Image: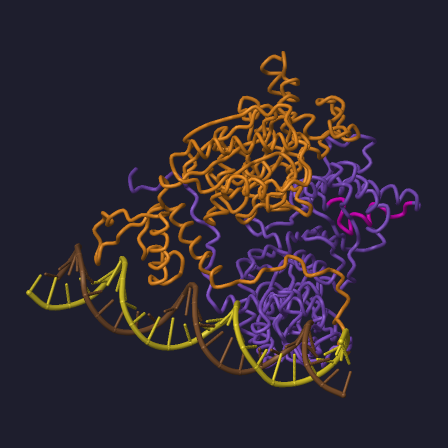
Chain colours: A orange, B purple, C yellow, D brown
Amino acid sequence: MTADAPHALRRPPLRPTRKVLPEHTRAHHRSMVLQHLFHSGPRSRADLARATGLTRVTVSDLVSSLLTEGLVSELGVRAEGRVGKPATLVGLRTDAFSIVAVDLADDERMHGAVLELSGTVRERRSAQVQGLTGAAAVEALTSLCRELAGASPLPVLGVGVGSPGVITPDGCVVQAPNRGWYDLPLAARLTEELGLPVHVANDANTAALGEFTYGDATGGGLMVLTVGGGVGAGIVLDGVLVHGDSHAAGELGHVTAVDERDDVDGAPLGRPAPCACGRTGCLETVLSVPAIRRRVEGLTPDDAAAALAQVGRRLGIVLAPVVSALNLPEVVLRGPRELLDGPLREAALAALRERTMPVISGTVQLRMTSLDEDGALSGAAVLVLSGQLGVT
Amino acid sequence: MTADAPHALRRPPLRPTRKVLPEHTRAHHRSMVLQHLFHSGPRSRADLARATGLTRVTVSDLVSSLLTEGLVSELGVRAEGRVGKPATLVGLRTDAFSIVAVDLADDERMHGAVLELSGTVRERRSAQVQGLTGAAAVEALTSLCRELAGASPLPVLGVGVGSPGVITPDGCVVQAPNRGWYDLPLAARLTEELGLPVHVANDANTAALGEFTYGDATGGGLMVLTVGGGVGAGIVLDGVLVHGDSHAAGELGHVTAVDERDDVDGAPLGRPAPCACGRTGCLETVLSVPAIRRRVEGLTPDDAAAALAQVGRRLGIVLAPVVSALNLPEVVLRGPRELLDGPLREAALAALRERTMPVISGTVQLRMTSLDEDGALSGAAVLVLSGQLGVT
DNA sequence: TATGTAAGGACGGTTGCCTAACAAATGTGA
DNA sequence: TCACATTTGTTAGGCAACCGTCCTTACATA
């Protein structure tokens, strides 16, 4: 045995598992406390100690830091009469900070808002962006953010942006064709410009985060499918976004869903339609809002329902392998309810159940989002919550 | 604003983000050092400090612990002449410990081995298991492990077991029908029985881990599809196994791949065949080894190739949504090369490429495993490596 | 009124990292 | 040839953050 490498491992050690310093430990524990306060509401220090596994001493210390930071406040003693010294409740001051969020999904206008930590919208602003690209688009985004930050009566915790395109976890836009952005370090640029922490992510991913945090998510994972001009998906597994090898995870819109070699039973979906991506039969060619509208236009209600069901069935067929491979507990649809939340969703769920094994099909959910159209905004807010407070 | 919860979050705080103690920090850093030594071969303390971001002081301290544990050894000074004091190399003692691994994928015999840390097999043993179920099967497994541990001339670092069935991350077998195991805490049971650390995981998952660690994996993620009596898949994303909501991730074998409503172009795969799971047209009904053998039996080479390509195409269709949704850089096939590594693989790759968008299809790989039939064993060894040393 | 229980704070101890400084071993250039 | 720069690995001192233990406070109950 020589002193050489013990075997031929060509792969370099990836995911360079950063070092952990005491202050990181501290920050982690701080996040645990905030997480509990966020999800479970006001608690006593002793409650938090039990929930986190830390000692009361440590939690007390942590809480006192948070008190001086103004992130939490004491809310008096607990009402319930129990034995022992009554607990003084500590609560997250959702009224003390706000979050600025911007949604760039729309090609015509960018929609922004000031939100409370609880996710409710306080102020709205939007700005024309039609036709703006490159630096001009960044400019418009910057001033919208500035305007929103100015409109907030409270200190702003940070800025969250959801944008179409391929975006790295650190907020660098690899490509966003509709804005003409390529390899643009948008988060860094905005952070510098605004003097505030800025987080940027793909809009489908922010939607998934928003649903996971503010929605009715039940399990540890979900996929959110956003149906609009196109189709995008965001996947959360074990509470963490899936980014993919080249940050392009969730690109389900251009999976082939209609194939003339497969689909011949009366050709219910017609010939595979050409897609903007240059191929034919992509999921987007049947599932996007314009595609669905075209399909049901002028049909009788019954025929329209049948047409929607055909689209849904295609969706279910595409979803089945994904749901099976990941053992995903639920898939959430976002988009126009009148199109999605009827025969389409039912047929998709039926196909999904029909085409997966019982252990999967017995529990899988396929439902509409529990958030309104601000889902993308609140998702962008979660970026800030998660980045600044460690809360998801 | 009252003292109530700030909003209606029904979801309890999941993934209870365990507390971090100083000793955990220490263990983490220890793993970082071992990881580097494992993947990059012998290094000096100063090299390790640069690679990990830790101080030379801290690394020295860690290395001295590892030296007294016997896990690493000093290998003399570095040969290359550079300025400054010559470095003393420190290397992982792959010759000082061994790992016991057992593969339960085969219904007739359980195959075990003693491996070096480098993954090479030193000793082999196997035991009859045909017909054994429940406690008797556990018994047989225990004595095989004992025999292997006895056959190792070196101290055994731990025991890794790959088994079919649904298995939790902590080694509890939720269900493994062919062994009649249900809710069996196998890892805990064996750990107690053998006095050694035991790790248990699904065999498809161990295969994925093995490929990721010892194989030619290039990216941060991969899926390994094991084709045998059935079809199983294991998925590694960002270096971590995907377990799924109910630990059933990777169950691709029973996704519908043949549907009489879809497939009518000359019915090349025939009618959807009934599957053991009670439904019809599952991937397993066309892709399992027996199914493929039956299909090509007695055909001319050309016809056989066409038949294999039809199966491959079905596989590609099932894979496309998964690869797209996760942005998976590669899919690896495990199983009989003479069946899989020809027209079948090529057709699957062609279908996969044809049915995904360019950013995906341009880079995705579909290849045979780079490990031999010991892939499952070395994967089980990785369980130990990862569990005991934090190395993957 | 006495007792038990729970909350929260104060004090000391341990772990594990960092910075700074230093000794040893080598190459480099005047 | 010799001083000096460079790199390695070690020693010493200090800081951050955790824990365990003990204490006071404040209530419920018998």
Q: Is residue A54 above or below residue A150?
A: below
Give the left or right position of residue B14, taking residue B324 as reference.
left
Whether residue B380 is visible to the viewer of this picture, yes or no, is yes
Q: Is residue B296 magenta?
A: yes
Q: Nearer the viewer, residue B78 or B219?
A: B78
Q: Nearer the viewer, residue A218 or A5?
A: A5
Give the left or right position of residue B382, taking residue C19 as reference.
right
Residue A12, given in percent of the width and then of the height, sits at: 71, 60
Residue B252, given in percent of the width and then of the height, sits at: 67, 46
The picture quadrant where one finds residue B153 is: bottom right
Give the left or right position of residue A25, taking residue B53 as reference.
left
- For the record, the magenta segment spans B285-299
Q: Is residue B241 above or below residue A320?
A: below
The picture quadrant where one finds residue A6 is: bottom right
Q: Is residue B40 magenta?
A: no
For the N terminus of chain A, which image quadrant?
A: bottom right
Q: Is residue B90 above or below residue A345?
A: below
